[in-house]
Amino acid sequence: MKCKVGVIHGPEVLQYSFPDYHPFRSDRVQRFYNEVLPEFLKNYPGHLVSVSPELATEKDVLLYHDVEYVEFVKRKSVDGYGYLDYGDTPAFKGCYEASLYVVGSTLKLVKMIAGNQVKHGFNPVGGLHHARRDRAGGFCIFNDASIAIKYLLEVMKLKPVLYVDIDAHHGDGVFYDYYFDKDVLIADIHQDGRTLYPGTGFPHERGGGDAEGTKMNIPLMPGAGDEEFIEAWERVEEFINRFNPEFIILQAGADGLAGDPLTGLMYSERVHRYATSSLHKIAEEKCNGRLLVLGGGGYNRDNIVKAWREVLLSLLTLPEE
Ligand SMILES: [Zn+2]
């Protein structure tokens, strides 16, 4: 079976790029645009569609972020110097607009998927999972994943939403800001917090209050590879099987692949195929295929090309039983 997949593609999202020698610069996404997308557009005509980036409105951002924080980002975006957090996330001129393109593009795919214009979507510059309601963190200014979740719950009335995060870093922004929300199911496989930023994501954290049991953390030690990931993934599938999500979001950071300069995991790109194919199948069974993938991290540029290529392949085709 072949599916119609929308991919965010346009120079606007390249504006989300930190200056100087920062690891998160737009040459990451540019490599994907140069080396992966043209081949897929040629090989999957009518199935892979290029979707132009879109600006979010301030109202969209305020679904999740605090107004004081949004005003702070606006001011820093005009100044263009200093940091938005304690030293990982520098301000740059235009960082407010650049962030609005990330959020707007993720929301555009949410609407296209929910409106059946495409079956699945991929925003390579999305998945900024460390930003909190009131602050930036870990290269993330506005949390497009968290905003998309709020939009799905409050505007589209689709719930529960399932958020799965396989970035090497724990998705602390999404995880803790929805910790007490039973309509947000979260499974997060990441490098153990005692060995990597942001230092969080422990197995005993399963959701609070009446959301107890709706969250799952699986930390892996540095050096863990495909075998450990696949074992962990079995537990993720068991977790998901207890629920009936109406929309699924995957944060598919490529920084768990061996050779990433920031992390110690040793996955191959098979992990991205495995996780995306599994969620693709689950989405078809449970929620009419509604699956959105966000690019997330990944700082070895060759790994980005390899991992996100597998993501696209797995979204475009669903293996027959
Ligand atoms: Zn990461």
Image (cartoon, rainbow, N blue to C red):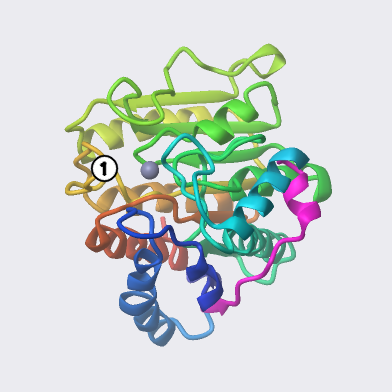
Residue 8 picture quarter: bottom right
The amino acid type, in three-letter code, at marker 1 is Leu
Q: 126 and 15: which one is in front? A: 15
> For the point 35% across and 24% down, which residue is it?
193
**Percent coordinates x, y for residue 168 in the rendering:** 34, 39
Q: Is residue 229 visible?
A: yes
**Percent coordinates x, y for residue 87 in the rendering:** 42, 38
Above or below 272: residue 86 = above
Question: Seen in the image, is 82 located left or right of residue 298?
Answer: right
Above or below 77: residue 151 = above
Above or below 152: residue 102 = below
Question: Seen in the image, is 254 located left or right of residue 145?
Answer: left
Q: 24 and 122: which one is in front? A: 24
Q: 274 and 208: which one is in front? A: 208
> For the point 72% across and 59% down, which residue is it?
114
Q: Quadrant of ligand 1?
A: top left
Which span is picked out in magenta? 48-65
Identify the residue position indicated by label 1 in the image: 262
